[in-house]
Image: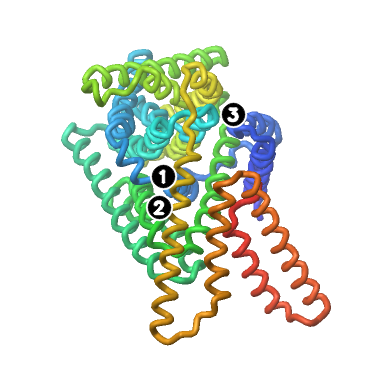
Amino acid sequence: MTDQGLAFVLVVVVAVAASGVCRWRGITPALPLLVVGLGLSLVPGLVGQVPTPETVLVFLLAPLVFALALETSYLDLRGASRPILLLAVGLVVVTTLVVGGVVTAIDPATPFAVACILGAVLAPTDAVAASSGGRAAGLPRRVLTIIEGESLVNDGTALTLLRVALVVVAAGSVTPGQFAVTLVQSIVVGAGMGALVGAFVAWLLSRIDDQVVGNAAIILTPFLVYLGAERLGGSGLLGVAIAGVWISHSGSTRARAEVRLTSSVLWGQLAFLLESVAFLFVGLELPSTIQSIHGLSWWQFVALVVLTVGVLVATRAIFIAAVRLVTPAHLRAGRRTSLVIIWAGARGPVSVLAAFTIPVTLADGTPFPGRAEILAVTFGVVVATLVLSLTLGPLVRRLGFEPEDDAELLERARDRAASAALSRLDSLVNNARADGMVVPEQLVAGLRGAVLVRRRINRRSQRLTETYLDWRRDMLEAERLELQEMRDEGVLPDPVMRDLLREVDVREAALGPAD
């Protein structure tokens, strides 16, 4: 392995280890990862190990956007579609143009298209940073849906604008008509590719019993969608987001349970890995990126970052205030909700990875104008907004939002589900006996008892529920130890024991995660 490969592996290992410690301690990992990255920047040979822009797009950004999309509810997005689309499309366009205009006004030598690249990179918000504080403070579900839905959809919008801006810079000059055609083509082709592949994979998952093959299809999806859309002139990341939401919605009812379980774990781990690496890269590359800006001191850099954050917050506040003014009273968001949404504008991994995708040189070999400045300001804004995001939780509590209590809803849902199961059992028994099948009463009683016991302990107390689950896990562990002992005694062949252990593991997985 090359020195560059070893350095990259070391960075990934450190990112995962640091993020794992943060999860263990219950700490949001973004800022600690930045600090660790700053520390690693002092190690010779590590700085500059960031992959090429195309590698970042295909192997980091596309699967990260896909992982976020898989965790998004289509129904929640549809229910809050109006505010989400206004923020994810309208605000992104306004932010891109405003940042571009401000940069050009401050430095007339900077082309407007180059300034708009910075605006497009900083336009998307980060769902994890924005919602973690609000969720912990008990922010209502609809507000969280708007914040998280905005973050998912605005990734595609912002990165589409970034793609168009890069085309403009590379071409030198583009007419408004050409700009419009490029933008429409990016959206239509990207969305079409995402819907087409998403529908096909969802159909495939409904007919595949093998979870290995099913998950392999899901793993390939973001790469297939991205590369296909980009090949046809569309926005690959917009397509990836649409495919992920489509598969998530369809798979909740049509895919096999084993595929859903393993896919959820797999993509949760991938999102954890990709976000960890992205945040650590910010700290790792920040010092060298700032040093690469000629004629700009640290104090000037800090002032530029503060100015950019101020422009972003002010643009977001004015846009949301303007939307409230033109929205009918019965559809208008409350002042408290608007204030929280304004403040939930932290930037994160998507902005970082998007900045890395800016080419190092143009087609003629000349350096890409302003690339170092865009990277440095992006890193600085991400750090600043992540620090500000720590105040979101206290703000939510200060505004007096009441946490939603789902206990009654959960009990009603469990009762209805249990009643449906018992009704289906009665139908199965009656049909089987009508066909002449002998159905032992012990079998029926065991099936019925499992449902009734679960419903009763859920009704009586959470303590009984926990006791039931703990005892079931202990019993399954006893089965597991006995099978291993039989294997060690030579009574049970190892392949047979592995099959039996898999059965025990499936029964334990059905109990849910242990606390």
Task: Give the farthest residue toward the front.
Answer: 441
Residue 23 percent coordinates (x, y): 64, 39
Instruction: Count residues near mark 3 (Cα–Cα under 10 Å), then give few for <14, some for 14-19, many for 20+.
Output: some
Instruction: Count residues near mark 2 (Cα–Cα under 10 Å), then give few for <14, some for 14-19, many for 20+.
Output: many
Q: Earlier in the sequence, mark 1 or mark 3?
A: 1
Q: Quadrant of residue 31?
A: top right
- In this orientation, which residue lies closer to the viewer: 71 or 79? 79
- Mark on residue 288? 3
Can residue 360 be seen?
no
Residue 427 relative to residue 113: left or right? right
Residue 157 percent coordinates (x, y): 32, 37
Three-letter residue code for mark 3: Ser
**What is the secondary structure assignment of the residue under circle 1?**
loop
- In this orientation, which residue lies closer to the viewer: 420 or 78? 420
Pointer 1 residue: 72
Three-letter residue code for mark 1: Thr
Q: Earlier in the sequence, mark 2 or mark 3?
A: 2
**What is the secondary structure assignment of the residue under circle 2?**
helix
**What is the secondary structure assignment of the residue under circle 3?**
helix
